[in-house]
Amino acid sequence: MQEHFARVKDLARRITKVENESDNYQAILEGLHPSKTPLIGITGAPGAGKSSLVNALISYWLEQGKRIGIVAVDPTSPFNYGALLGDRLRMAAHFNQEQVFIRSVGTRGSLGGLCEKIVEISDVMKDADFDFVLIETVGVGQSEVEIAGLADMTIVVLTPDGGDDIQSMKSGIMEIADLIVVNKADRPHADGYAANLIRHLHEQDREVPVLKTVATENKGVDALGEAMLHHLESGRINQKRNWLLTEKAFRLIQKSRMRDIDRNSLYDDVSRESSQSDFNIYAFAKKY
Amino acid sequence: MQEHFARVKDLARRITKVENESDNYQAILEGLHPSKTPLIGITGAPGAGKSSLVNALISYWLEQGKRIGIVAVDPTSPFNYGALLGDRLRMAAHFNQEQVFIRSVGTRGSLGGLCEKIVEISDVMKDADFDFVLIETVGVGQSEVEIAGLADMTIVVLTPDGGDDIQSMKSGIMEIADLIVVNKADRPHADGYAANLIRHLHEQDREVPVLKTVATENKGVDALGEAMLHHLESGRINQKRNWLLTEKAFRLIQKSRMRDIDRNSLYDDVSRESSQSDFNIYAFAKKY
């Protein structure tokens, strides 16, 4: 128990250092070992029940003696915050469990995007002694695309409320999902919605399992857990691995090369120079 | 007439050079003059009727003797392609008009994102002799966020079919819209949908005009044109201008600094090195 707390405390500290780029964070990152721990992304619209689903999955895995790390990406939007905070508090029931570690990170700026340090934080989590690491993100703007470039497996959570706009709204989401969950499946039209979805995926030659759950009642969660394991063990994530590593390397290189560019100073420079009549942004950018 | 064709041909050539980075494209870019031509982004889900709306706006402006440049960003998704091609062909009715120039560009890769050269292409368009430059993009994935970082004014096109998922799906879109169009407003529930939207925006303290149109019948298009002009002349786009220039400068610097990184070679490097047991992506990325 004592040892466990020390380990958790150490993990929390390492994440904080990486998040803030403080102390020896670079050494922490370069000291990470190759990890086989699967990183699972869970995304979906606000109100789809992602946190309830994560909650239910935690219970399911705890029964199997698994250890789980969760990264919950908070949206900056004040509009969503209240509701999510409620979910987070519900999830906190698991905080006392020895085998669950939950870390909430902010999105810091980028509109609809993930936390700027999400790559690094998830790598530190993967390096710890978990069976699964989950990242829960709100699927607005670009975060669902970013998560697909990061996670070994991406789960998209939908609700039957979406009605007939499957075709119109979700083509972007369809492309990134390794598995689709229709949550709140006890609602009217849920079966029709799921059938519609399956037919639509079939038309696009996409082999994506569609599972129905009622997360708040733990319904369908066992089947979901099994389907996830099946996907993770299918070898498909190995096919994806080098592509994910390339994306990650690209992002890290980009970040490192842009490190000296401060947006506020850039704003000041642009504002000053653009007031001149011969201002040209291409000539301006070339100077950096 | 002769002179007009020469000008259009020259514009098309300049765009092609910039798109392909061929010949003197850098000189073309650095020779651009500061332009006051407003850049208007039109985004929305596939099927929302964006192309019909653009079509109707073109007719409206032509009646006023305006000259209009259009950049239509084609999605790479084969799923959307057929329908859009149809729209594009309809728009082609305007091709013979002297005052309309339509350029279709591909998205080339980036999932749901805009064309990699969209910043440069829209600047070349703004440098030509148009009263308005419009960029039409399909709002999936991150393109709607990208357009907001580029256009002086962003118009989001919705349809009443969305039903009650305003709250859930559209918070990302809400944040970027300067003006919202509820198209296909002759459908059932359209009034309720628009009222719902207005109430929702009000709750978030967002002052965004909501206009109803039936683009295929030219209904509501005059009012839309006036509302757009009102926004463009309100001074709000000046407040946004330095922020937009900063974003643009940031992207240009980033692109220039990453120019030597080829994703395919990076993939090969990552694949080779990651097979070694002591592989660490942070140490790997540091070498570049």
Image (tube, coloured by chain):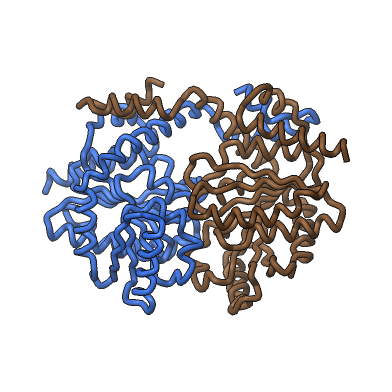
Chain colours: A brown, B blue
Q: In which quarter of the image is residue B239?
A: top left
- Identify the residue at horizontal 72%, vertical 27% (top origin): A28
Q: Is residue B174 visible?
A: yes
Q: In this view, does A116 lie above or below B153?
A: above
Residue sitting nearer the eye, B127 or A22: A22
The spot of residue A226 in percent (x, y) is: 79, 61
Please state if B145 lies on the left or on the right of B38 as rendered. Answer: right
Q: Quadrant of residue A35?
A: top right
Residue sitting nearer the eye, B209 or B270: B209
The spot of residue A107 in percent (x, y) is: 55, 42
Image quarter hosting the C terminus of chain B: top right
Q: Is residue A48 above or below residue A93?
A: below
The spot of residue A139 in percent (x, y) is: 55, 54
Q: Can residue A207 be seen in this view?
A: no
- Identify the residue at horizontal 38%, vertical 47% (top origin): B147
Please state if A17 lies on the left or on the right of A128 as rendered. Answer: left
- Identify the residue at horizontal 68%, vertical 30% (top origin): B281
Please state if A159 lies on the left or on the right of A60 as rendered. Answer: left
The spot of residue A27 in percent (x, y) is: 70, 23
Please state if B38 lies on the left or on the right of A70 as rendered. Answer: left
Q: In this view, does B29 lie above or below B134?
A: above
Q: In this view, does B96 lie above or below A212?
A: above
Looking at the rendered structure, the number of numbered marks drawn on it comes to 0
